[in-house]
Amino acid sequence: MLALFTSTYTNKVDKKGRVSVPAPFRSLAASQGFNGVFVYPSLDYAAIDGSGAAYFERLAAMVDELPPFSEEREAFSTAIFGASHQLGFDPEGRIILPENLIAHAGLSEAVVFVGLGQQFRIWEPTAFAEMNAKAAQITRETRTRLSWPARAPATGNGGTNGGGAA
């Protein structure tokens, strides 16, 4: 199974800030050794960034590569780890979003979980609709910049894909 956060899900948030994490997201996060997710304020958007333990550990390793006591390392550590929350799933697969993150993302009655591969993002639905339209436009304009690695030549049967003589 491909271990990526994919797809888009809209779920309701109750008055206590509880929201059900989409089942595929829960399954992937739990498979990484923690029955929950790591979340923090997005650095670029009024949204919440989240991941399983594997991505978060990778992020920590990248920050650890910065020189100790450097301004950059202190900034990354404070902005990401100082603002992060480790949220375990309750028996119904829900998490309780902290009030500071709810305020940062402008959340109220519903949220949109958006898979981003190794991580995911939680949006207020109207803000996500605007971002999604912008992302679609950027993708249409820049799609030719994606480059696929060349495929390895077919092997066996004289290099043909059909496997037999014509």
Image (cartoon, rainbow, N blue to C red):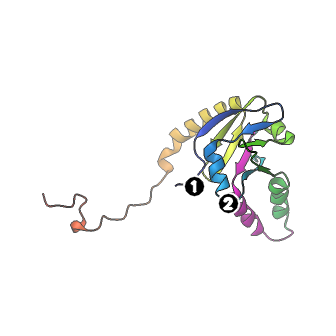
User: Which residue is depicted at the point 79% across and 33% down?
Assistant: 106
Q: Sort mark 1 into few (<14), some (14-19) or many (20+) by Cα contacts within 10 Å.
A: some
Is 68 magenta? The answer is yes
Out of 39 and 80, give the one closest to the viewer.
Answer: 39
- Which one is earlier in the sequence, the residue at label 1 or at label 2? 1
In this rendering, position of residue 157 left or right of residue 121: left
From the image, tell me which residue sits under label 2.
54
Is 98 magenta? The answer is no
**Image x and y of residue 41, in percent:** 79, 46
Q: In this view, does 30 lie above or below 48?
A: below
Q: Which residue lies furthest to the front in this view?
A: 91
In this rendering, position of residue 146 left or right of residue 11: left
User: Which residue is depicted at the point 84% across and 67% down?
Assistant: 70
Count the numbered circles shown.
Answer: 2
User: Which residue is depicted at the point 73% across and 66% down?
Assistant: 61
User: Which residue is depicted at the point 83% across and 30% down?
Assistant: 15
**Image x and y of residue 43, in percent:** 76, 48
The amino acid on which the numbered mark 1 sits, given as a three-letter code, is: Ala
**Image x and y of residue 116, in percent:** 62, 47
Which quarter of the figure has residue 99? top right
The boundaries of the magenta stretch are 47-69
Which corner quadrant holds the C terminus?
bottom left
- Disc 1 is placed on an element classified as loop
Which quarter of the figure has residue 31? bottom right
Q: Which mark is residue 3?
A: 1
Out of 81 and 1, give the one closest to the viewer.
Answer: 1
The amino acid on which the numbered mark 2 sits, given as a three-letter code, is: Ala
Q: Residue furthest left?
A: 166
**Image x and y of residue 143, in percent:** 49, 45
- Disc 2 is placed on an element classified as helix
Q: How far apart are marks 1 and 2 (CA)?
A: 10 Å
